[in-house]
Amino acid sequence: MPKQKKLQEPISITGISSISPLGVSQEQIWERYKSPSHCISVKNFDGQQTPIGELSIAVKQIISELRKENDHFEALDNSVLYGIYVARKAVQNAGWSQDRNFGVNIGSSRGATGIFEKYHKEFLDTGKSSTLSSPTTTLGNISSWIAHDLQTAGPEISHSITCSTALHAILNGVAWIQSGLADKFLVGGSEAPLTPFTIAQIKALKIYALEVDQAYPCQAMNWDKKRNSMYLGEGAAMACLEKGQVQNALALISGIGYATEPLKHNISISTKADCFQKSMKMALGNYTTDEVDAIVMHAPGTVKGDIAEYNAIKTVFKDNMPALTTNKWKIGHTFGASGILSLELAALMIKHQDFIPVPFIEYKNTPKKLNKIMVNAVGFGGNAVSILLEKPNRN
């Protein structure tokens, strides 16, 4: 049984912003979530039609304009530019525009994969490396550029813990705030993995979706599927965390959980996802299972990964199963950014008091209220994180 990690006081989420195949504005994103259609497009990679979750032409134009804004931005990877754009919006949404006294922790699973592949090809072709190849591909590239752009006075942290990276950023932000060393933290993840080598790597693992002609190529949460159906998407999301419950809180973090299980294979987790069982129990703390109204699952669309997480939820919640959903059927798996995009979905559902189902799943019932929603993420090696969100008390 994991040791309970009770928060000293709730942590307020006062601003959220994202960029993904759903769009950039909260209104547009919610409208897309309400639609049963997915955001998948198909692109040719190495002669094979491949489903991807790509930014729209209009959103790509926004990033193109941002790249022209500063001469230094020209050499940056898309993952950094996505992060800069979203960080500006999140800070503005939280009312931090005049406040620079906050920390930054933005992670990425793959990092600057686009320009890394470009520079490596140049090296193979010429035997020489470009001048900016090192500083623009370092792990700390995203957080350091965001901190520089916002001129923050707090600590800046970078990390990569595969697909649970963004939720680990939340853990770090909460820890800094709970310790008293910071009152505010900007946390999140950014990923731009739609590159030939990255796509090839995931296809080599035999988990990439191949059936592009299906109505829903990604069958996340279809427990009876026989083939892996995960596909990659790009995007970034940030959340502004503040100490205590503040007046303009979008949602409260009332529980956190984390766990790592023994490694049996580089990408596998156990049949009943022991890591998720531990992280969810830790996030619940003193709350009872019947208090959780919904769970935004990690559920990337793989056969073993989806069912293992489902088994973990059944083991923990037993007869008090919450409503389950995921967004990966719609936008793809954004690796290190996926957890924070799931958290955004949870926060939007709490705000609108409206549950977003997976359209090809049959639901016996959906929750009438959404007071508490759990968000799950897990990465290669069984490193799980669970975050419990709660509706703010407006009294």
Image (cartoon, helix red, strand yellow):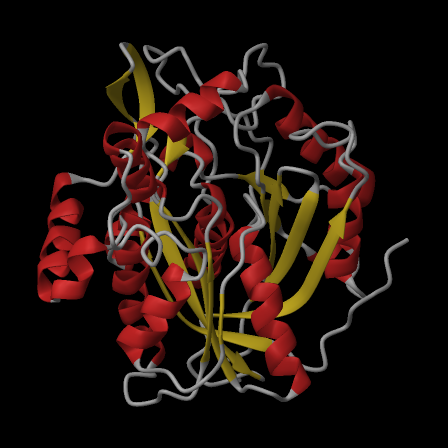
**Left or right side of 120 for 322:** right
Residue 305: in sight, yes or no? yes
Residue 329 pos. (x, y %): 43, 30
| Figure check: 215 above or below 372 | above
The residue sitting at 63% across, 89% down in the picture is 180
Residue 320: in sight, yes or no? no
The residue sitting at 17% across, 48% down in the picture is 59
The residue sitting at 80% across, 44% down in the picture is 316
In front: 78, or 94? 78
Residue 362 pos. (x, y %): 54, 25
In front: 138, or 294? 138
- Numbered marks: total: 0
**Left or right side of 253 for 149:** left
The residue most toward the right is 1
In front: 336, or 37? 336
The residue sitting at 80% across, 49% down in the picture is 278
Q: Quadrant of residue 359?
A: top left
Residue 252 pos. (x, y %): 56, 71
Residue 10 pos. (x, y %): 63, 77
| Figure check: 334 above or below 141 | above
Q: Quadrant of residue 88?
A: bottom left
**Left or right side of 199 for 32:** left
| Figure check: 322 above or below 333 | below
